[in-house]
Amino acid sequence: MWNTGNYFWEEKSVAKWSEERIKETLGGFKFAFPGGELKVTSVEDLKGEASVSIRKGKKIVAYDYNCKLKWECSFKDGEGNEVASMKGQYELPEVSSDIDDEGDEWEVRPSINKDPQNLKAKYEATIIRK
């Protein structure tokens, strides 16, 4: 059994599990809104580490990652037909336990790669940056 005394500092990497879970959770994210849907299509450039430590019987979880999320947004008419779309990415430069522990928000840098109907101005503040 790992750290049976629960006293000494021991650290165990959970990076592989964490990376798989991040890709599974964020890679399938969808946000429905009136008139359409934004969905993450892939998790790219995922870099970082995660670990679990035990110190005097207390579990300490630490993680620090950065990644890019590719997304696409489709807009539909009242009958459910797609009438417009755009694609982009979210860059998350630092997703870490330190930021989470302090109650701060993670920085998200959105960008639009493909916007043939020029919808950025209309939806950037309400859908893309939420």
Image (spheres, helix red, strand yellow):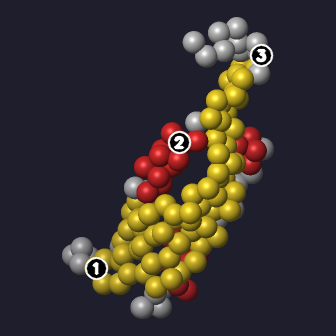
Q: Which residue appears at 53% of the width and 47% of the height? A: 19
Assess whether mark 3 and mark 2 are in contact (beta carbons under 8 angstroms): no
User: Residue flagged by tag 3: what amino acid is it?
Assistant: Phe
Q: Earlier in the sequence, mark 1 or mark 2?
A: 2
Crowding at mark 2 (Cα within 10 Å: few <14, some 14-19, many 20+): few
Other residues around mark 1 within 10 Å, as few (<14) / some (14–19) / many (≥20): few
Per the model, the C-alpha gap separating discs 1 and 2 is 38 Å
Residue 11 vertical position relative to residue 116 in the rendered view, above or below: above
Residue linked to disc 1: 82
Residue found 64% across the figure and 70% down from its top: 109
Residue in view at x 68 percent, y 62 percent = 93
- Three-letter amino acid code of the residue under disc 2: Lys
Q: Find numbered disc 2 in the image and state the secondary structure of the residue it sits on.
A: helix
Position in image of residue 74 (x %, y %) = 36, 75
Would residue 112 be visible to someone looking at this image? yes
Q: Nearer the viewer, mark 1 or mark 2?
A: 2
Q: Nearer the viewer, residue 11 or 114?
A: 11
Residue 117 sits above or below residue 66 on the image = below
Q: CA distance from mark 3 to mark 1?
A: 58 Å
| Callout in the foreground (3, 1) | 3
C-alpha span from label 2 to label 3: 24 Å
Q: Say which mark, if any, is on residue 16.
A: 2
